[in-house]
């Protein structure tokens, strides 16, 4: 067992890699009565073309999500039914880059932990279950297809990305789901659902040594490993479409604007890129920004300009969303603000101080900190133990470098108008 000291905040996380390759992270806290468990499998919707142990495999979009649904089935029933009987909560989610199975409970921590590990690593699939789940997922997809806002987002992703599989819907579309076979499920499971492709994150008032002893014993049952190589088409820096306008069942005019940057072609590390990007977004469009004041004063948008990032495998897209009776006028004002924006040193210093305070406060919610650990493992392949130092070292000069990257980025926009 290794102790990871979280620098500058007097906190620690315990880490051990079991013989199977499963990485275990434990954060103990007396601030909660809840035990939270997250088993992260490093497979998401974008992983549809890969080599496993030298064999090339290509699968339809949506398999990772389909597999998540099926994994809850056991020979005795379903994991949901089991946890409902014992008073625990279980859930799972598939994203572009991972599938995470979560359980939380107030007692019987070890029993609930072992059940979580066993139902995920002991698959129970057959043709009947695949067909039953296919029907459920097709109904879900039909609901998503009728969601204009969700379609708007994925149309925006299609504007941005040419080849990056983050452009596709996580659950696939109906034609994808209809093609998924039991072989696709088994091949994906056998490739990605090995313990050396998983992380286990535990938080709560946990006895660390007792828990690790239980896990070491459980781990002996299956130590088979797989060597995975994802195959990805090269994504150009240019956007797929500069602009796109269409109509749907909405009540107001909506617009997305994106600025696409290849973070792998910069001098920033992945973690630095994310830190500088997040602070920059807050400076430009946060609650105390000049843009907020402009929106409140001039009312050129309905409400405010929402801002977020769309992530590709190599690219990051600073994205803006807004509604307005006059989209062109709003777009022109926002783009002018963006292009003319200059960083104020005092504002930057304030944002850094706020970020440092958030780092300290984050440990007051153990479950939320567990989610931060998961985010680190998925994005960076390790737990970041020096966030405080990284934020403290943010400089005005490098922040201006980041600003220039986005000002010179490839741009795209998409307009959604009410059907006439």
Image: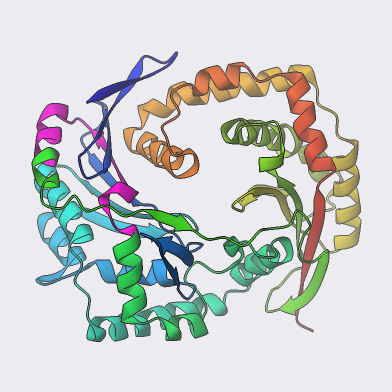
Rendered location of residue 160, percent (x, y): 72, 60
Magenta stretch bounds:
192-215
Q: Is residue 12 left or right of residue 115?
A: right
The residue located at (50%, 58%) in the rendering is 96
State which quadrant residue 239 falls in. Answer: bottom right
Rendered location of residue 316, percent (x, y): 66, 47
In the image, residue 199 lies in the stretch drawn in magenta: yes
Q: Is residue 364 left or right of residue 396?
A: left
Residue 68 appears in view:
no
Tag count in the figure? 0
Report the residue that reaches farthest toward the front. Answer: 54
> Relative to 414, is 398 above or below?
above
State which quadrant residue 187 falls in. Answer: bottom left
Rendered location of residue 356, percent (x, y): 54, 20
> Relative to 335, is 55 above or below?
below
State which quadrant residue 108 falls in. Answer: top left
Q: Quadrant of the N terminus?
A: top left
The residue located at (86%, 34%) in the rendering is 341
Q: Is residue 34 left or right of residue 55?
A: left
Q: Nearer the viewer, residue 157 or 18?
A: 18
* Color encoding of the figure: rainbow
Q: Nearer the viewer, residue 4 or 333?
A: 4
> Relative to 38, is 391 above or below?
above
Residue 363 appears in view:
yes
The residue located at (36%, 59%) in the rendering is 53
Q: Quadrant of the C terminus?
A: bottom right
Rendered location of residue 395, percent (x, y): 71, 19
> Relative to 39, is 384 above or below?
above
The residue located at (63%, 73%) in the rendering is 148
In the image, residue 108 lies in the stretch drawn in magenta: no
């Amino acid at each position: 067992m290794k102790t990871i000291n979280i620098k500058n905040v007097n906190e620690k996380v315990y880490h051990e890699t079991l013989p199977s390759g499963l990485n275990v992270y434990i954060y103990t806290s007396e601030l909660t009565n809840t035990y939270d468990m997250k088993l992260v499998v490093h497979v998401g919707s974008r992983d549809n073309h890969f080599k496993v142990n030298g064999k090339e495999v290509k699968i339809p979009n949506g398999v990772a999500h389909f597999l998540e649904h099926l994994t809850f089935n056991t020979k005795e029933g379903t994991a949901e039914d089991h946890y409902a009987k014992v008073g625990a909560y279980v859930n799972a989610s598939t994203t572009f880059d991972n599938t995470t199975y979560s359980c939380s409970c107030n007692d019987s921590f070890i029993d609930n932990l072992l059940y979580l590990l066993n139902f995920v690593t002991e698959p129970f699939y057959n043709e009947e279950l695949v067909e039953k789940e296919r029907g459920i997922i097709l109904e879900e997809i039909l609901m998503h297809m009728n969601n204009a806002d969700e379609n708007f987002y994925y149309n925006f992703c299609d504007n941005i990305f040419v080849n990056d599989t983050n452009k596709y819907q996580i659950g696939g579309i109906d034609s994808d789901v209809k093609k998924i076979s039991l072989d696709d499920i088994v091949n994906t499971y056998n490739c990605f659902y090995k313990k050396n492709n998983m992380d286990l994150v535990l938080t709560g008032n946990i006895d660390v040594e007792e828990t690790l002893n239980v896990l070491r014993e459980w781990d002996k049952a299956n130590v088979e490993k797989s060597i995975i190589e994802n195959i990805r088409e090269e994504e150009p820096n240019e956007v797929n479409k500069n602009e796109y306008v269409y109509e749907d069942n909405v009540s107001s005019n909506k617009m997305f604007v994106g600025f696409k940057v290849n973070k792998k072609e910069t001098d920033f590390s992945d973690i630095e890129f994310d830190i500088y990007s997040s602070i920059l977004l807050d400076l430009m469009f946060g609650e105390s920004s000049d843009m907020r004041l402009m929106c409140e004063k001039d009312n050129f948008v309905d409400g405010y300009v929402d801002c977020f990032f769309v992530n590709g495998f190599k690219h990051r897209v600073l994205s803006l969303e807004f509604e307005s009776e006059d989209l062109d006028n709003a777009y022109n004002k926002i783009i002018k603000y963006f292009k003319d924006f200059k960083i104020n040193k005092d504002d930057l210093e304030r944002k850094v101080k706020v970020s440092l305070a958030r780092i300290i406060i984050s440990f007051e919610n153990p479950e939320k900190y567990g989610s931060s650990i998961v985010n680190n493992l998925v994005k960076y392949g390790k737990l970041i133990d020096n966030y405080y130092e990284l934020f403290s070292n943010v400089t005005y000069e490098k922040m201006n470098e980041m600003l220039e990257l986005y000002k010179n980025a490839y741009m795209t926009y998409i307009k959604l108008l009410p059907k006439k």
